[in-house]
Image: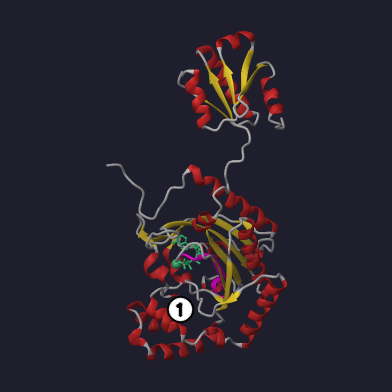
Amino acid sequence: MAIKAIKGINDILPDVVGKWQLVESVARRIFSNFNFQEIRIPILEKTELFARSIGETTDIVEKEMYTFPDRNGQLLTLRPEATASVVRAFIEHKLHLQPAMRKFYTMGPMFRHERPQKGRYRQFHQINVEVFAMDDPMVDAEVIYMLLVFLEALKIPDIKLHINSMGCPDCRLPFRQSLADYLEGVSDKLCADCKRRRLTNPLRIFDCKVDSCGKLVENAPVLLDHLCHECEKNFQGVRDHLDSLAVAYTIDPFMVRGLDYYTRTTFEAITPHLGAQDAVGGGGRYDGLMKALGGPDLPGTGFAIGMERLILLLDDKAGAATDSHNLFVACLGEEAKKKGFSLVQELRLSGLSVEMDYESKSLKAQMRRADKLDATHVLILGDDELAKGAALLRDMDASTQEEISLKKIVEELLQRFKLEM
Ligand code: ATP
Ligand code: MG
């Protein structure tokens, strides 16, 4: 029996790859306008990195990570997210000593053992953005703005922005107590997971996907009503700056995000078009993370976008090939095939997209293949033409053909296709 890919881990076939390339190139263009630099980080890290950063009692660490010992018995994890690795790299390479390196982006696969469904996979891809050592609320507003500009550039429809504040340890600690008190009163109605969460990490209950817990949470106290003065002022600052950029948002006091490291402003870009998987991207501030991972006490903020969800939301035609010229070289006879073989390479080197067949088929069969390949032109090399030092160029759309000399064929084709030499 043929071996199949692992469930929830998908191939990306050439017919959609144009969409991926579009998303990547728009990201590079826009992020670089905002002065972000690309960083590339490993896919495998020590398990400890994620356990310490994401939080031991989050869903990701408790039940979603691909963790295994390597041949030396070291516990490794396929990264479930990128922020922890970017922070690790920043610390490891002492990038805080290099003031030019504060704003990063990275793209690539992430791994989470979740139930595969539309918009949710076990290997999925993210675009991540991180900003270090800047805590002005203007930076939060700018990062959110960049996310929206990016989604807008890709013409993703009906995006809504939700924001919340996760406060700081100063306000979270007393809040945790009042939440715990509330949850104690309703503990018999909580799902099994939340019964445990109530004692280990009560805030996580806001992220529970079980309906009955969602109902209980509606009446729970929220952190937003318990922010300390500094966090309150900071959140107001972010909102003022969003207003000044004319960014519309909804304040969602129930949004806690799935990772423990968030502080202060968090946000999500939501779509109504993907069913239950409504978050296209999300992020927030994580001011204590760098210190917790053994680095300098520098603040951070950022976001992650789910690329598969973006691709599902793109217009059908987005990323379709825009190559306006595609040449097929049809050869009739052995002599012509030899000539064609070297001519094809020469034309490719000069910048044209060119294909030929290696089997000796009839002209009719070769024309059919040219048509399948969407060739705009076919160059026909036959023994008769070769003897004259010429070839026939057929325009597939116009269904016309004319003889052109082989002497200056490259210049001639480039000129016709209006391509630079
Ligand atoms: P969700 O609530 O949908 O599980 P999340 O809060 O776990 O999302 P993050 O960890 O913030 O997601 O990751 C950022 C983005 O990555 C999400 O907004 C989503 O678009 C995408 N994403 C997360 N998990 C998956 C997955 N299993 N498959 C595909 N995309 C995903
Ligand atoms: Mg999740």
- Kindly tell me whether mark 1's CB lies below 8 Å from ligand 1: no
Quadrant position of residue 164 = bottom right
Q: Position of residue 6 (x, y in %)?
A: 35, 52
Quadrant where the image shows the N terminus: top left
Looking at the image, which is closer to me, 406 or 403? 403
Q: Amino acid at mark 1?
A: Phe
Task: Provide the residue span drawn in magenta.
Answer: 277-290
| Colouring chosen for the image of the structure | secondary structure
* Quarter location, residue 133: bottom right
**Closer to us: 57 or 18:** 18
Circle 1 SS class: helix
| Residue 282 within the magenta-colored segment of the rendering | yes
- Residue 29, compared with residue 410, is above or below; it is below
The mark total stands at 1
Residue sitting at x 57%, y 65% = 303
Q: Is residue 262 left or right of residue 232?
A: left
Residue hosting label 1: 206
Tell whether 124 sits left or right of 352.
left
Reply yes or no: does residue 23 show up in magenta.
no
Q: Position of residue 109 (x, y in %)?
A: 48, 55
In this rendering, does residue 136 appear at all? no
Residue 119 visible at all: yes
Where is residue 316 drawn, in percent x and y? Answer: 54, 49
* Residue 157, position as x, y percentages in the image: 58, 60
Q: Which quarter shows the C terminus?
A: top right
Residue at position x 49%, y 42% in the image: 14
Pointer 1: residues within 10 angstroms few (<14), some, or many (20+)?
many
In terms of depth relative to the viewer, which is nearer, 220 or 201?
220
